[in-house]
Amino acid sequence: MRNQVLAVSLTATLVLLSTHALPLHAANTAQGTSGSHWVEANERVQEAGGWKAYAREINAAKKAASSASDSAQAKRPTLTLEAALQRAQLLDPSIAQALGNAPRDLKAYPTLSDAQRAALGREARLRAEVQSLYFSAVAANERLHYQLQVVEAASVASELASRMQKVGNLNRLHQSEEALSLAETERSLSSARTQAQAATEQLIQRLQLSGEQASFSLPERLPPLPTSTAPPAISKVDSLLIASPVNGPAQIKAQSEARQALHARDEAFRLAAHYRDTVLPLQKQISEEHLLHYNGMIIGIFELLKDAKKQVHAVQSTMEALRAYWLAEAALASKLFALREELLTSRRDAWK
């Protein structure tokens, strides 16, 4: 939700900024006034349509691009995580065949046959792999979405700087810096597009999709972090196995890897929660103050644009922390299963 709040805040900022740039058809009029006073240039721009004209231009372009994008997205079905997991399981029918009606209750694990436990192991590894690929693809596409907003803010800043420089209200150094910032954000956008495509293709390959099946959309954002203030607890059985005395290198290794995965998952949760509960609210507060300062003419338009970029970077960092949590959660599930299998015979008391 806070991600959406900041996104709305950024959109509002960009709309505000768009109404303070020279209109395209007024640029030629302003070019010949480089030595004139800024107020006089503003008056001439107002006569040609002024800020409102420019606002109409970019808003019309945005609306057309958004409509085309929405139309294309609407034609493609959304691939859910559950559908991805079901597809992967269909590719390995031996798992369902081996498990049959086997109980899934963790306490019943020691009663399963070797074949059933082996099938559960393959299923655990399959789920961890598909979840990792799926979350990575969703995160990469979400990152692309926010990078587009960074480019939009940089584009507005560069365009405004160029036009202000033409009428003599901005030096060439500042204008060049804004142009360079736009170039750098466009480079990052290209990288984000490549990463999003690669992550999606890896998921397609793992699920062996082709034709229309490979033409799908993904959720706009990752699943939210659990609302609890502490990392989710593992099962009582796993808690006992992860802390019990063991013998032999294989058992020690399995226990150590499970502890490490648990620690990584817990730290990933704390970091994601920190962004959710502390960083984003502070960034929202700062952005609101910047807007108030701008309205009070305490700061200028470029300071507001810099804040708009920071909004997106804060959301991107939050999303990356959330992605790390879900990947760590998937890895933990796989390591805990390996631990149960390794200690099955030596610590049967843990299942009682």
Image: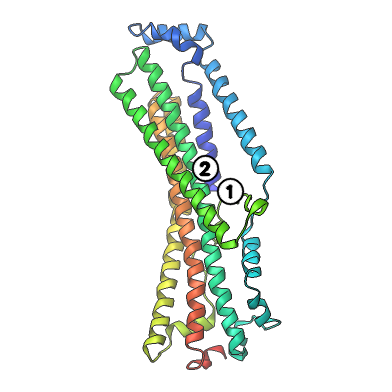
Which residue is painted at 53% across and 28% down in the image? 15
Q: Is residue 78 visible?
A: no
Tag count: 2
Q: Which residue is mark 1?
A: 220
For the residues bearing labels 1 and 2, Cβ distance under 8 angstroms: yes
- Does residue 208 appear to the left or right of 229 in the view shown? right
Q: What residue appears at the point 57 percent right and 69 percent down from the top-left corner?
A: 127
Q: Position of residue 104 (x, y in %)?
A: 64, 80
Identified by mark 2, the residue type is His
Residue 143's place in the image compared with 66, above or below, is below
The secondary element bearing badge 1 is classed as loop
SS of the residue under disc 2: helix
At 50% across and 93% down in the image, what residue appears?
345
The residue lying toward the viewer, choosing from 214 and 281, is 214
Residue 64 percent across, percent down from the top left: 62, 28
Is 77 placed above or below 45 here? below
**Alpha carbon separation for disc pair 1 and 2:** 9 Å
Instruction: State the image coordinates of residue 11 (x, y, percent, origin top left).
Output: 53, 34
Which class describes the residues within 10 Å of circle 1: few (<14), some (14-19), or many (20+)? Answer: few
Three-letter amino acid code of the residue under disc 1: Glu
Q: Which residue is mark 2?
A: 145
Residue 149 to residue 319: above or below: above
* Residue at 53% from the left image edge and 73% from the top image edge: 125
Foreground of the two, 51 or 190: 190
Q: Is residue 230 above or below residue 33?
A: below
Write down the quadrant of residue 89 in the picture.
bottom right
Percent x, y of residue 190: 44, 40
**121 displayed left or right of 318:** right
> What color scheme is it?
rainbow
